[in-house]
Image (tube, rainbow, N blue to C red):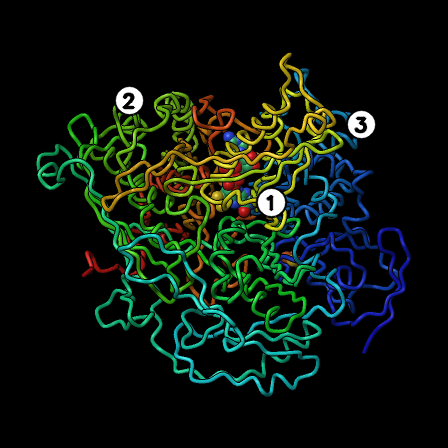
Amino acid sequence: MMQKKFLNINGVAHTLIVDPEASLADVLRGQLRLTGTKIGCGKAQCGACSVIMNGKVIMSCATKMKRVPDEAIITTIEGIGTPTNLHALQMAWVKHGAAQCGFCAPGFIVSAKVLLDQNPNPTREEVRDWFQKHRNVCRCTGYKPIVDAVMDAARLMRGEITPEALGFKMPADGKIWGTDYPRPSAIGKATGTINYGSDLGLKMPPGTLQLKLVQAQVSHARILSIDTSEAEKMPGVYKVVTHKDVKGKNRITGLITFPTNKGDGWDRPILCDEKVFQFGDAIAIVCADTEANAQAAVEKVKVELEVLPPYMSAPAAMAPDAIEIHPGTPNVYFRQNIAKGEDTGPIMEKADYVVAIEDYYVGRQPHLPIEPDVAAAYFDEQGRLVIMSKSIGLDLHHAMIAPGLGIEPEKLILAQFPAVGGTFGYKFSPTIEALVGAAAMATGKPVFLNFNYFQQITYTGKRSPFFIDLKYGANKDGKIIAMESNWAVDHGPYSEFGDLLTLRGAQFIGAGYGIPNIRGAGYTVCTNHAWGSAFRAYGSPQSFFASESLMDILAEKMGIDPLELRYRNVYRPGDTSPTGQPPEVYTLPQMIDILRPKYKAALEEARRLSTPEKKRGVGVSIGIYGCGLDGPDSAEVWVELLPDGRVQVSTNWQDHGQGADMGLLATSHESLRPMGIKPEQIKLVMNDMAVAPAGGPAGGSRSQFVIGNAVKNGCEQLLNAMRKPDGTYRTYEEMVRENIPLKYVGKWTTPCTPCDENAQGSPFASYMYGVFMAEVEVDTRTGKVQVLKMTLVADIGKIANKTVVDGQIYGGLAQGIGLALTEDFEDLNKHTTMAACGIPYIKDVPDNLEVIYVDSPRELGPHGASGVGELPLTSPHAAIANAIYNACGVRITQLPALPEKILAGLQGKQIPVVRRPIKNPPF
Ligand code: MCN
Ligand code: FES
Ligand code: FES
């Protein structure tokens, strides 16, 4: 039964026929195509769907049409301002980089509009209170840029500043490199006009099939039969696709590169055939005319299973009686040794100080982008299958899914949606690309699939937990002379990149210190919990949690200050990394010098303000990460002079929200600046394999460094071709007249050597370095920790865009706070919503985030730049754990540091821990 509604939406009177049970969000987006309003959690937890109704902020996902009063006055982001007529809030959002992925921006902006209507002169704390109350969540920005934007918008609305103050001021030298030039996609994001996957999905042509998945509800099982006959008869159903319809090998290949891996990398089905390996595994795809019809038919697919024991952690899967999850491949399928310098045994015996820890554990951190996973597929006019998704590795995923789908590589094109609402690395793995591909191939029709948030959480990859044992031996001066490590990686059921991740343990446990002698081994373990995918800082948060906690333990044992102990040990000329590589810069001592006075002041303040109920503490840590894929890493960029004098720069520098468009523009502009080009004369062509070459995946904080160098190379070739003997530059017409080619292929490869079987090598040509400081307050009655301030002294080389890098760091620090205190994906019954997974809301993240950059140009970096994306998440959580200990004497060994663990520690009880894995398993 439908209802007639009279509504005033963005100043326009609408008569609508609606389903009273439909949500306002669905009506706005689906019926009115007002796609600026986004749907994230779908459960009144994130505020992405916020709109204004009769002067109040409401969550439209949770507002049924029957509760929308007749003649309601509704304002969506489209009613706030437009690209050519921006509202003050939108101008300020652009200025402050408050939209990174931008998926949260419309919800925040409409929410802030009501705040400023009610309170034109709010304090920062009032702004924070407002967003806390209205549950506006941002996963990218760390919130600070959003508060900055609201404060500036309020100033503009009060007439205290002019709109020009929020615009970009071009410096006299015309240089945008290193400035706060706004990213090209900022206006589209702040106005809700740029299309994300779910928006484009609504705008697909008639006849597009809507897909829903039949997913496993158990974690480990043998499939006995799949019966689709009843489902196929359901209304609107076009076809139910199973593994039998997949033309190729029906496997996603992990492109295994390590010969000692006991698996073959062909372990992940596109659609399950013989076994279910984890909860949520896709068994069938219902293709129907509408989402509702597809969902109804999902219930009718009959799957007969023989349920097997699920191994939900590395210890369980390593137990001697555990069966092989992938028959024929042992559950412990890869071992990575590390051996640097001399045998550590005798050195430990002679060491003045020896400290050791066991089973340090960083859990299965969920990525929690606000936008759930989404993909579409269709055949183009050349008969090619085009898959659009949130992929951050288009060319990589192409190679991973083409054989499984059974498609000729040249017949498959991958592209990103125009905007992607955050991935933080989960999209380094293909997720639903092969599913939409298989459905399009089986039906010949355009298809569309959008996960809900439950699916996003339960069926995308997660950070892989590490269990780490670690020992340091130090001399009487506190110099670490030997390290012994042992680590087990719970990589879930799919092996893709699991060997590489295990190698990260060798590369980053103890990184930052010139430890001359190291022995250890890491093991990759197959389990039935969520498959391991990349997560920002991949492998390093696990590594640093152990090595940076042990650093504090050593300092305490020696009776010296933890920052000073680090100062004695950090890389100096002559030192090498755990992989035996000399660092490319030696900035860590200088960085500690910068932090020292702030650290002393913070300790002093903590002492002064501590009370028995609220104990304060300060902790520090070192964090390092490499920029690049391991070993030689390449990118390609096309640079072409266009007839109108503009230069077109094309590459796949995939954007998750980090600012690929800005990085490409700034780097191109700086490289082409000698010809006097303006930024608006550079045309970017990005993230579509049909029109742009491989830049390589946007992981490993590699893009600015690696793609940036290819950009520079291509631009230099064009400039050389355009340059006349007198030093001026040819026009397009002159180039054509002189028959000089207009298009140049820029290429660059990192001069790296991969690590050998002892993890020795030079895997990365540039690193990012950070010294973190956390200031916390522990409530001794509840065990709850509040982070009061985070400080990061950062060496990221030269900066391409200041607003972008600030935003990257604030956002990464916020994720570090989540990792330290709240975030987890462990319990399949509990950790199923954004809030239950522990996403930090604005009041969980301090407004006081301080970043200090050291100016240290990289010789190999494009215009001196290194990377930034992952640095802020390398070890902020270790600083927080150290600060908790400093505050109240409780040492948390397994994250997250939930209140109950801290309370147990305060009461002298055993702190609950995850089961311990078998040490040195047979291999
Ligand atoms: N940059 C800069 N100056 C430098 C280094 C980088 O201005 N010296 C800019 C670059 O131009 C780019 C950004 O900083 O806009 C990040 O650059 P880089 O460190 O090279 O990383 P990538 O572009 O390869 O991005 C990936 C990185 C990773 S691996 C993850 S995971 C991640 C991240 O960046 N996921 C993100 N940042 C994210 N930010 C958002 N909002 N959403 C994600 O999903
Ligand atoms: Fe509605 Fe999250 S609150 S989508
Ligand atoms: Fe807020 Fe990405 S910018 S979620």
In the rendered image, residue 427, in percent from the top left (x then y), is placed at 51, 53
In the rendered image, residue 48, in percent from the top left (x then y), is placed at 66, 53
User: Residue 264 appears in which quarter of the rendering?
Assistant: bottom left
Q: Quadrant of the C terminus?
A: bottom left
The amino acid type of the residue labelled 2 equals Pro
Q: Quadrant of the N terminus?
A: bottom right
- The residue tagged 2 is 573
- The residue tagged 1 is 692
Whether the residue under disc 1 has CB within 8 Å of ligand 1: no
Q: Earlier in the sequence, mark 1 or mark 3?
A: 3
Can you say whether 533 is above or below 660 in the image?
A: below
- The residue tagged 3 is 159
How far, Cα to Cα, is label 2 from label 3? Answer: 55 Å
In the rendered image, residue 744, in percent from the top left (x then y), is placed at 59, 34
Q: Report whether 94 appears left or right of 427.
A: right
Can you say whether 753 is above or below 673 in the image?
A: below
Closer mark to the observer between disc 2 and disc 3: 2
Q: Report whether 632 appears left or right of 50.
A: left
User: Residue 186 appears in which quarter of the rendering?
Assistant: top right
The amino acid type of the residue labelled 3 equals Gly
